[in-house]
Image (cartoon, coloured by chain):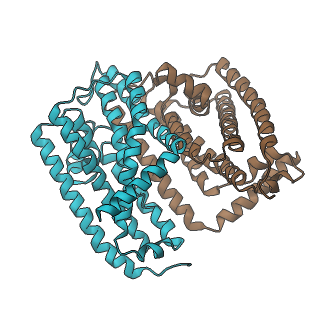
Amino acid sequence: MLDLYRGSMRLSILENFQYRVANYFYMIGMIAEPVIYLVVWSTVARAQGGSVGGYTPGEFAAYYIVWTLVRNMNIVLTPYAWEFRIQRGRLSGELMRPVHPAHFDLAFFVGWKFVVIIMWLPIAALLILFFQPTLDPTPGGAIGFFIALWGGFLVRFFLLWALGLITFWTTRVSALFELYFTVELLFSGRLVPLSLMPGWAQQLAGWLPFKWAFGFPIETALGRLTSQEIVTGLGMQAVWTLAGLAIVSVVWRAAIRRFSAVGN
Amino acid sequence: MSLIRLAWAFFRIGAMNDLQYRVNFFVQVFQSGLALATGLVGLSLVFDHTSTLGGWTRYELLAVMGVHILMGGLIRTAIQPNMERLMADVQEGTLDYALTKPADSQTLVSVREVRIWQSVDIVMGSIILIFAVAQIQTGVGIGQALAFASALLLGALMIYCFWLMLTTGAFWVIRMENIIELFQGVYQAGRWPVGVYPDWLRTGLTFLVPVAFAVTVPAEAVTSRLTPNTLLGAALLAALLMALTRFVWRRGLRRYSGASA
């Protein structure tokens, strides 16, 4: 099993390094989003006499620059991929293999992450140069961030993998997926740091998985959390990863029973 | 004149094609509604914490958002589908079919496709815009309306030129799909007036990617900010871009060798 992971990861790293330019276009398009949020909220903070929701312009810069790394780490198999796999009959081949297809996806994306991190470094350097972030991480925060980064990836990986399986039951999935992504955008800390949201929304966010995959790693890196909070957060990531894993294994079994191959 | 007839014919065929799939209309309405809700949440979060942003009030920014949605709808209805088709044609060599037709090739590749359901955003953006303008002032003068319409038209023209030039790049580098992601990312910046961005970014959004002219300038027209000089500048730049696009397109065509052989 370990060999399978090592092999798939190497393949993915090699493959993605080949498409450097395509990867960069993709990343630059993605950078626009946090830069927009950052500029808007820095403007608001300055107009409010230096800070808003506990963030100064420099801290917003730090938040949204770390955001770019977390966002890249958060990219997992899109649920739309299942439309392609099922409609084209690609799945039939994968079902023939003796291991669960999730293993191949997981290995592919873990491999890709190494490419992504290396390619992210120059972008981060430029953003730091332009936006002058205030960032003084604690050693505990740094270690916590490293774990939380991968924890967030796992949470999102399994939940979206499970979400994609809905495609086995209905072909009109885009409305549902978009709804999911919108809720995620609002309650993860992707749109704004959650401390800028009204109190009830912050409380609700704690009960949803999205914050643990996104806002929590960022706040850990910024040194805004006590070690107690970091440990709790990592625990929440473990809980949501296990929950996702459980949903995947149960739903998968029902899904392949529904599946009738198309094409070859 | 015959070119307009040609565009109209393509538009009718495309529209009739899309109109067969009625459910897609409801899916589109739902997705546009979600995007709108997200935009409104963002706006209200900002104004929970401040009363003006870079000199723009809440309803003025709502007007900017209206124009942004409207223009986005316009792009996705008429511009983007054509550019996607052109990119695919260059990759697969099927552009031959368009080039051998006895009409001007640039016009032809620019009017072949239309995605009618995307125009839901044009309607939705207009409604937001009208609502916002009604909150700001009591009436819109005929001069203001004309200025708005011409600013919008010029903005759309510039976006078209920008995009066709980029797409023409496909003649040289073939794989260009990711510019769609790139453009959509940068276009998001237009949701806020470009005046809030730092200088280097504002310059880029004005001249590199003409988001400023596509969204901010029309919004200035309906919020009594537009000076005749800006509009004149927009007209000049649009003319310049049209000429440049024509030139780039010709050069690109010379590179194209087809793939049928």
Please name the residue shown 39% across and 34% down the image.
A121
Q: Which chain is brown?
A: B
| B130 displayed left or right of A9 | right
Q: Is residue A226 above or below residue A114?
A: above
| B30 displayed left or right of A60 | right
Q: Is residue B1 above or below residue A226?
A: below
The percent position of residue A138, horizontal first and vertical second, equals: 17, 30
Instruction: Answer yes or no: is residue A148 visible.
Output: yes
Q: Is residue B10 above or below residue A192?
A: below
Residue situated in front as seen by the camera: A181 or B256: B256
The percent position of residue B136, horizontal first and vertical second, equals: 49, 30
| A76 displayed left or right of B65 | left
The percent position of residue B17, horizontal first and vertical second, equals: 69, 64
Please name the residue shown 54% across and 44% down the image.
A22
For chain A, give the colour. Answer: cyan
> Where is the C terminus of chain B found, in terms of image quarters?
bottom right
The percent position of residue A259, horizontal first and vertical second, equals: 43, 79
Residue situated in front as seen by the camera: B230 or A160: A160
User: Residue at the left extreme?
Assistant: A228
| A170 displayed left or right of B149 | left
**Residue A70 occupies quadrant:** top left
Please name the residue shown 56% across and 78% down the image.
A263
